[in-house]
Amino acid sequence: MVRGRGIAVLKASVVVPVYNAGAYIDRCAPSLTGQSIGPDAYEVIYVDDGSTDDSAQRLARLAARFPHVRVHAQENSGWPGKPRNVGIRMARGAYVHFVDQDDELAPDALERLYALAARNRSDIVFGKAHGEMQGPGNIFRFTRERCSVRDTELFETLTPHKMFRRAFLLEHGIEFPEGRVRLEDQLFLARAYPLAKTVSILGDHPVYHWQRRGDGGNNSSRPPSPEDYYGHLRNVVRAVKERSEPGEVQDRMLRRNYRVEILRPVTEPRVLQRTGRQLERHFRIVRDLAREEFPPGVAAGLPGVAGLRAHLLEQGNLDGLVALGRRAGAVRLHVEVGAARWRGGRLTLPLRVWLVHGDGSPVSLVRRPGGGFLLDPGMLADIPGQDAWEIQDPFAYAHGEVLVKDPRRTLYWYPETDLRPRLEDLGEDRCHVVLAADTVIDPLTLAGGGPLDPGRYELWMDVQSLGLGRRPRVTLPERARRAGHPGRRAARLAVVGTPPRMVVAAWNGPGGQLQLRVAPPRKTSLRRTVLIGAAADERLHTPARAVFRRLPPAARARLRRSLRPDE
């Protein structure tokens, strides 16, 4: 406990709204009741929102067993908002952490999050999340002690499964909307983010595990109408504007909603899947909302193709959006892989990437005689009334990174890489944006400063260029896998750490994807360590392979067994 105004105050309160959770209560409870921060430092508050199954009995058993578990029952309100608000008011902790009834916390989640919060007097703290319902987010690339909406894209994460300083919520009257309100999580964070002076992000340790229920119980049972959905989005936008001053920071906060929710119906695949009145209905609703609620600077700050979509939307050019959707849908990311090498137990992977059309030709820019650039005319073909589109800054929002994915936990790690954009000439008046860097993967430090757990990992890329985002696997083309491409030499062993663990990098994933296999650390003989080191060292590989081929078959088989990683 901590002391506040002479009375004991808990460090944290975990608030869990419950409705017909059934067996998920018992499945997820151990992660909440056994936190390493200690039972005297926190509490778990279950708010039962009128469950009609056996949830009440399960919760009663938990409260009887664990003194730091409290249960509150109420009439059904129909949505998680009211139960969470009740939990905020009931909480005795300095910080409140929201957890859904299906999900789990890491054993040391509260301890780590509270330590980060206490160091910085943070208003909001959130940690790395993982699971089938969570994709990669580079906001968790590393830990940030102190940040805010003024310097960090906080609106890229709009789920409420975070830790909030309770006094901050009460002081500003920040609550969840109650009843059946769509985008209630976004509205809550739209009220909180602009007012938070200090936000801390725990990026180097996963603390929240999203579970996908087999019965679909953590998904909305009925999709909303577009009028209903975008009516609630209007409230989100207004909440941001009410709590911030017009200008660049406000525009950046709103840009995520514009890019994701507003442009979604007029972006492939949806703009190509819907037709007739259904397409026109979505188009009309998002166009009206964009023109009525979003300041001009929001769309003006969108890069490349995204900016063109916003222009066509606000000009009412639905045919142009459909045509652009066909063109953009064929664009893919070309990944050029250089020779991968192990050096000092770290894998270096040279990469160059750029956007290409369906026929493999680069998505280009046209240099204007007086300076500046125009978008590739091939992207504008068949778009009514749009013969040219100026690219103000070809490097705006252009970035890329390599993702090392643990498929067992759907957990992403970010190796040392910085794909920097540059312009490369294509001849005549054409050029294109290329992102290039050497990615360095250190198996001993990649997992938040610590070693990767034993297992198999997949390498992906996440790239934004000219307003288009692509997330391909890191692969070699089939012809390169068959031929003597230098990238094939990534299929090597390395020995890292003490005691040593073996790491294999090989192009044996789907479509020739680069994968890492990490063996458990183990005691090994000096002979085995030397053999593995020779196999892993680029300088020794060729002569070692020549010697290997001269060995008798039985000796080669024994040597292969000694080099095989243990899993």
Image (cartoon, grey):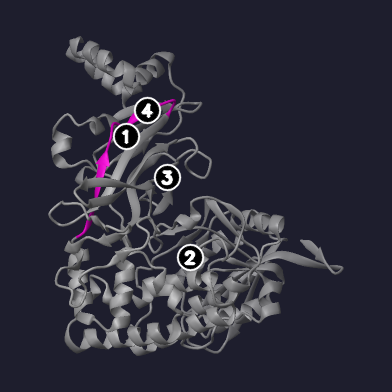
Q: Are marks 4 and 1 in contact (CB under 8 Å)?
A: yes
Tag 4 residue: 342
Residue 66, visible in the rendered structure:
yes
Q: CA distance from mark 4 to mark 3?
A: 19 Å
Q: CA distance from mark 2 to mark 4?
A: 39 Å
Residue 418 located left or right of residue 334: right
Q: CA distance from mark 4 to mark 1?
A: 9 Å
* SS at badge 3: loop
Label 1 amino acid? Ala
Q: Position of residue 107 (x, y in %)?
A: 57, 54
Tag 1 residue: 505
Q: Nearer the viewer, residue 241 or 230?
A: 241
Which segment did they paint magenta? 331-345
Q: Nearer the viewer, residue 105 or 473?
A: 473
Residue 267 located left or right of residue 166: left
- Crowding at mark 2 (Cα within 10 Å: few <14, some 14-19, many 20+): many
Numbered label attached to residue 103: 2
Label 2 amino acid? Asp
* SS at badge 2: loop
- Crowding at mark 3 (Cα within 10 Å: few <14, some 14-19, many 20+): some
Count of numbered labels shown in the rendering: 4
Numbered label attached to residue 418: 3
Q: Main secondary structure of the magenta part?
A: strand
